[in-house]
Image (tube, rainbow, N blue to C red):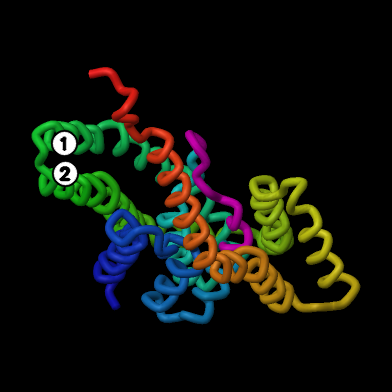
Amino acid sequence: MSIELTAVVLALIAMLANGEYFLGSSMLSRPLVTCTLTGLVMGDITQGIMIGASLELALVGSFSIGASIPPELISGSVLGTAFAIGAGKSAEIALPLCIPIASLVLLVKNLCFLFILPYFVHKADQYASEGNGKGMDRMNLLGGFISINIPIGLVVGLSYLFGSSAVNNLLEMIPKFIIDGLSIATGLLPAFGFAMLMKIMIKKTNTTFFILGFALAVYMKVPVTGVAIFGACAALVLTGYSAYNGKKGTIEDSSQELKNQTGNVLATQEIDYENEEF
C-alpha cells in the first residue's frame, strides 16, 4: 500500500473514531479500537492490538470532566501506532509518540470548537426558535462532521503523509538506553492510568469493593479477568437484578398508591351542594 493511500485510510479511521457524534457513545474512540484498525492497515494487527492494550491501560482514566478536556486520543493513538509500526518499533515507542501528538492536536480541536462549531450552534438556535426540527437535526450532524471529523481526519492524514519519514529517521537516532528507559516507563504507566480512574471513581461507599478486589488478586491469586468477572456479577446482583425483579412490583405499588391518593384528594375536594353558597 502506497504512503498516500495509507494516509487516506488512517484519516478515515480517525473520522470513524469520531463517529460518536453520529452513532452515540460507542467507544470507537478508545485506543484499543483505533490502534487495532491502524495495525490492520499497517500490516501488523498483532502489534496494533498490543499497542492498543498498552495505551488503553495507560489512558484508562483519561475522560473529559467539565471544562477539563484530555488530549485528543484518537489522533495520538492512530499516528503513534502508525509511526511505531512503520519504524519497526513496539509499544514502548508508541506511547511516548501518542501523548505529544494528542496534546498538539487538542489545540486544533479547541480552535475548531471556538471558530467553526459556534456557527452551527447559533444556526440551530435559529431553527429552534422557528420550530424547524429538521433544520436543528441537520445542524447537529453537519456541526459535528465539519468541525470535528474533517479537521481531525485532515490532521491525521497530512501528518502521516508528510511526517512519516521524519519520524522514522528520528526514531532511528534514539539510543538503546533511552528505548530501555521508555520500556520501563511504559510498564509503569498502566498503574498511573488506573490511579487516574480511581481518583474519579473511589468514594467511601466503594472502598469495600476496592479492598475485596485487592484481596482476590493478591491473596487468592485470582487473575485480573476473574476479578473483572466477579465485579461484573456483583454489580448485576446489587443493581441490575434487584431493579429488574422489583420493577414490576414497584410500578404496580406506585400506581395503586397514586390511585389511592388521587381518590382521597378528589373525595376531600368534592363540592357540598347543600351547604355551598352560589
Overall secondary structure of the magenta section: loop
Q: Is residue 133 above or below residue 168?
A: above
The residue wearing badge 1 is 128
Give x and y (percent) for residue 155.
Answer: 32, 51
**What residue appears at the point 29 percent right and 78 percent down from the top-left corner?**
1
Q: Quadrant of residue 95?
A: bottom right
Mark 2 secondary-structure assignment: helix
Residue lying farthest to the top in this orientation: 277
Q: Which mark is residue 136?
A: 2
Residue type at mark 1 is: Ala
**What residue appears at the point 65 percent right and 66 percent down from the top-left corner?**
235
Crowding near the residue tagged with mark 1, few <14, some 14–19, many ≥20 C-alpha atoms within 10 Å: some
Give x and y (percent) for residue 98.
Answer: 51, 55
Specify whether 218 is left or right of 35: right
- Magenta region includes residue 202: no
Residue type at mark 2 is: Met
Looking at the image, can residue 91 be seen? no
**Mark 1 vs mark 2, CA separation in Å:** 7 Å
Q: Which mark is residue 225?
A: none
